[in-house]
Image: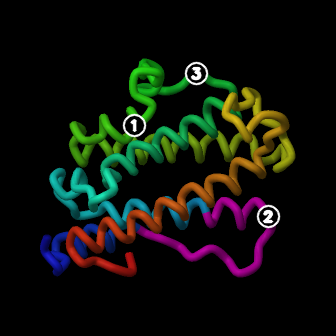
Amino acid sequence: MSTEISPESRAEIDRIARTDPPAAADEVTMLRSFVDFYRATIRRQCAGLTAEQLRTPHPPSTMTLAGMLKHLAYVEDEWFSVRLRGSRPAPPWDTVDWSADRDWDWNSALTDTPEQLVALFDDAVAASERILDEVVGAGLDQEVARPSGHAGHAGRITLRWILVHMVEEYSRHAGHADLLREALDGATDL
């Protein structure tokens, strides 16, 4: 492990804009701002790393930044496209045999290139943003088109719940990413 971030990595990190959420705003703006902040945080944590670094776990955990990027791309598609809109999963999620590997998103990321992972993540975020722009005018209390079958998610799920959940999902993984990135090259405060 190198304990010093390279100038190239620093330059790539700095190219990823991240805006602090406003201190006061309407609920939609506040929730979307926090989701955007943590999306950018994850991208900054992964920026400037090699394929080998993205695939490196910090034992005893098997979690990797590569797996995290792919997992979060899946989460974006699952909650905004599949659940909120009722659409079919986008590729590659549409052909995954989740019963054969329930952690397919995490595990399959180890064979993807950094460019593939970033593109998958960025495309998923862009699709989610398009969906949000289309539906947010109907309000945060609108219910999902396709309820989740997961325990604890049965019943009434609203757009508000999804946005709060996305803040939780991203902030949780941003903490993991902090530890993984620091272990890789010593980078902190990304």
Q: Magenta part of the protein: which range?
A: 17-34
Lower position in the chain sequence, tag 2 or tag 1 = 2
Q: Which residue is mark 1?
A: 105
Q: Is residue 151 left or right of residue 60?
A: right
Q: Is residue 110 above or below residue 89?
A: below
Q: Is residue 108 above or below residue 163?
A: above
Q: Label 2's element?
A: helix
Q: Are marks 2 and 3 in contact (CB under 8 Å)?
A: no
Q: Amino acid at mark 1?
A: Asp
Q: Residue at x 24, y 73 (%)?
A: 11
Residue 119 position by quadrant? top left
Q: Is residue 146 left or right of residue 138?
A: left
Q: Amino acid at mark 3?
A: Arg
Q: Which residue is mark 2?
A: 27
Q: Which residue is mark 3?
A: 88
Nearer the observer, disc 2 or disc 1?
A: 1
Residue 66 location, x and y as percent? Answer: 31, 49
Q: Is residue 36 left or right of residue 9?
A: right
Neighbourhood count class around disc 1 (C-alpha, 10 Å): few under 14, some 14–19, many 20 upward: many
